[in-house]
Amino acid sequence: MGISIAVIDYGMGNLHSACKGLEFNGASPFVSDQAEEIYRADAVVLPGVGAFDPSMRQLKSRGLVEPIERVISMGKPFLGICVGLQLLFESSEEGNEPGLGLFKGKVCRFQSQPGLTIPHMGWNSLELTQSEHPLWYNIKAPAQVYFVHSYYVKPSDSNVTSAKVTHGTQQVTAAVAKDNLMGVQFHPEKSSTTGLKILSNFIKLAQQ
């Protein structure tokens, strides 16, 4: 039995591919929206595909806000992916619902400019700003990962930015990390060898 990882089900995430990436690295992921099951996991993943407001409404309607806050306060490794990262912030230009507010800051839309495609979709290089963070162990810059997003997070405290990406002339936050709470804008489960290594590093955090 591998490390137990709860993949939070709030009706919005791409749960299957997230589980596959974790299984590939020897973990035992399970999909759940039940607080007690989530509490028993060694680590937690909040995936995300879709829009900010519907995602927040689903978290609230399923009673998942308090369990998320609690598992983070328990010190369990927690990883938000794509919209799952954005939900960790206070608000989003995509909608009106307040976010979880676990990171100070907001979610902004890419500004239109000549030659800039929105959404930012495809492979791009990470600039690691917290290169010593365990999530990046044996990840060599410039690491190529896969993005699909029209909005990006803008933390109030730049020190929580763990990686950046440049799209057009805009350099934006691609990952955040503070203590056991982490989030990535890209999709590690779609990012080939590099993404699988990042998931492996996350699993190792749960083994410590």
Image (cartoon, grey):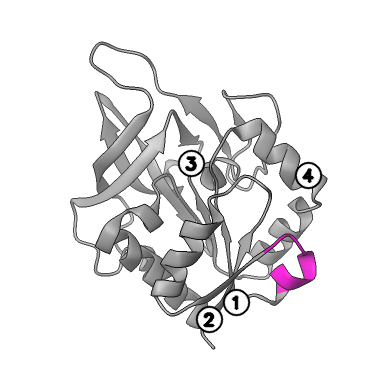
- Image position, residue 33 (x, y; %): 73, 59
Q: Residues within 10 Å of mark 3 (few under 14, many from 20)?
A: few
Whole-percent x, y for residue 135 in the image: 38, 64
Q: Is residue 16 left or right of residue 39?
A: left
Distance in Å between CA atoms under marks 2 and 1: 6 Å
Figure quadrant of residue 58:
top right
* Residues under numbered marks 3 and 2 in contact, where contact means CB atoms less than 8 Å apart: no
Residue 60, labelled with which disc?
A: 4
Is residue 48 in view from this perspective? yes
Q: Which residue occupies 74% across, 38% down?
A: 57
Q: Determine whether the residue tagged by mark 3 lies in a helix, strand or loop.
A: loop
Q: Report which quarter residue 158 is drawn in.
A: top left
Region rendered in magenta: 32-39
Predominant SS along the magenta part? helix
Q: Earlier in the sequence, mark 2 or mark 4?
A: 2
Identify the element where label 1 is drawn: loop
Q: Does the magenta stretch include residue 102?
A: no
Q: Are marks 2 and 1 in contact (CB under 8 Å)?
A: yes
Disc 4 to disc 1, how far (Cα)?
Answer: 23 Å
Give the residue type that dot 2 points to. Answer: Ile
Residue under label 3: 157
Q: Marks 3 and 2, how far apart in space?
A: 32 Å
Crowding around mark 4 (Cα neighbors within 10 Å: few <14, some 14 to 19, many 20+) is few
The first of marks 3 and 2 along the sequence is: 2
Q: Earlier in the sequence, mark 4 or mark 1?
A: 1
Kind of residue at disc 3: Asp
